């Protein structure tokens, strides 16, 4: 709970930082930039893309959720709190980057905010939230033109190529959640640009300050050499700019990481084998 008098809108608000994590190493390096700040950090390792947001909504002990991917690196924690304060003051239910734009390497629907970074005003969202099933059944096509008309004109690109991407409907399983949010509440869209590595995204707050840098492709970390080096360089850059030392991964950390990954993939493989067996049973039972 933030008690700094500078953040009047945050007083007596329960804030948590949530991360859907796949890489223990990346999570350790990214969370180091915001942990021990009086805000609880919650790491999910077993949630689907849409189940992650359902779990956040069900956490009734949390008023404000900050969703930060493990490959998104906060560049200034005080600016992050400033942005949360701004969102509450102006009654925004969601703050994030469009899933299409100048600094986004994706061609998704710009009405959607890509969930590598979000600020979610859960107290406001719960005023219209009944159950997650209804949210996931939201019919974007029925409201598309109304929603497009409300999308901020300043987010359009010079050639208006953005227009054709409003037709993207089912790119990701979390799309219905963000469509529902955008229809029922105000969303604040953050400007962004490409990093000099020509892949990562630099995100700006409402005052054009850099608030985080997102490398993308966390699942390629320690697997593909090019992306591992690129992500490591971005981490070094963010830490250097804040005058911080990159935490060392100790032997105990490595053992813990190895055990976690072993258990996770054992469970995942077992579950997939179970699902295949179940499908085959249904097929041959007909």
Image (tube, helix red, strand yellow):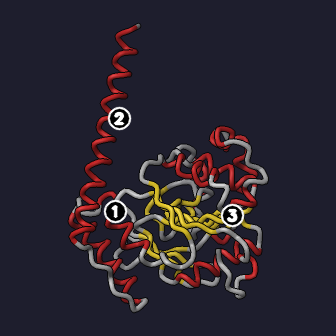
* Tag 1 and tag 2, C-beta contact below 8 Å: no
SS label for mark 2:
helix
How many numbered dots are placed on residues in this image? 3
Residue 164 visible here: no
Which residue is most to the front? 252
Residue 204 screen position, x and y as percent: 55, 78
Residue in front for this viewpoint, 30 or 231:
30
Residue in front for this viewpoint, 42 or 88:
42
Q: Earlier in the sequence, mark 1 or mark 3?
A: 1
Residue 260 screen position, x and y as percent: 30, 54
Q: Which residue is mark 2?
A: 271
Image position of 141 with respect to 107: above or below: above
Q: Which mark is residue 24?
A: 1
Residue 66 screen position, x and y as percent: 58, 66
Image position of 195 with respect to 276: above or below: below
Location of the C terminus by quadrant is top left
């Amino acid at each position: 709970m933030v008690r700094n008098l500078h953040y009047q809108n945050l007083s007596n608000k329960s804030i948590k930082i949530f991360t859907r994590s796949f890489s223990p190493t990346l999570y350790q390096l990214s969370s180091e930039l915001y942990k021990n700040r009086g805000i609880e950090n919650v790491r999910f390792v077993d949630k689907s893309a849409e189940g992650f947001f359902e779990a956040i909504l069900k956490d009734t002990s949390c008023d404000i959720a900050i969703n930060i991917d493990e490959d998104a690196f906060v560049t200034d924690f005080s600016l992050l709190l400033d942005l949360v304060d701004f969102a509450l003051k102006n009654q925004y239910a969601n703050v994030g980057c469009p899933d299409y734009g100048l600094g986004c390497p994706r061609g998704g629907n710009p009405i959607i905010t890509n969930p590598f970074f979000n600020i979610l005003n859960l107290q406001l969202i719960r005023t219209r939230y009944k159950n997650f099933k209804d949210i996931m059944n939201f019919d974007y096509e029925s409201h598309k033109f109304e929603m497009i008309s409300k999308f901020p004109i300043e987010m359009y690109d010079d050639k208006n190529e953005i227009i054709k991407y409003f037709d993207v409907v089912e790119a990701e399983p979390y799309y219905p959640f963000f469509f529902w949010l955008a229809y029922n509440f105000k969303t604040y869209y953050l400007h962004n640009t490409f990093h000099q590595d020509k892949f990562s995204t630099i995100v700006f707050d409402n005052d054009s300050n850099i608030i985080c840098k997102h490398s993308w492709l966390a699942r390629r970390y320690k697997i593909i050499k090019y992306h591992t080096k690129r992500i490591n360089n971005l981490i070094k850059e963010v830490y250097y700019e804040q005058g911080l030392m990159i935490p060392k991964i100790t032997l105990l950390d490595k053992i813990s990481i190895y055990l976690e990954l072993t258990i996770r993939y054992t469970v995942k493989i077992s579950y997939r084998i179970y699902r295949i067996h179940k499908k085959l049973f249904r097929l041959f039972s007909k």
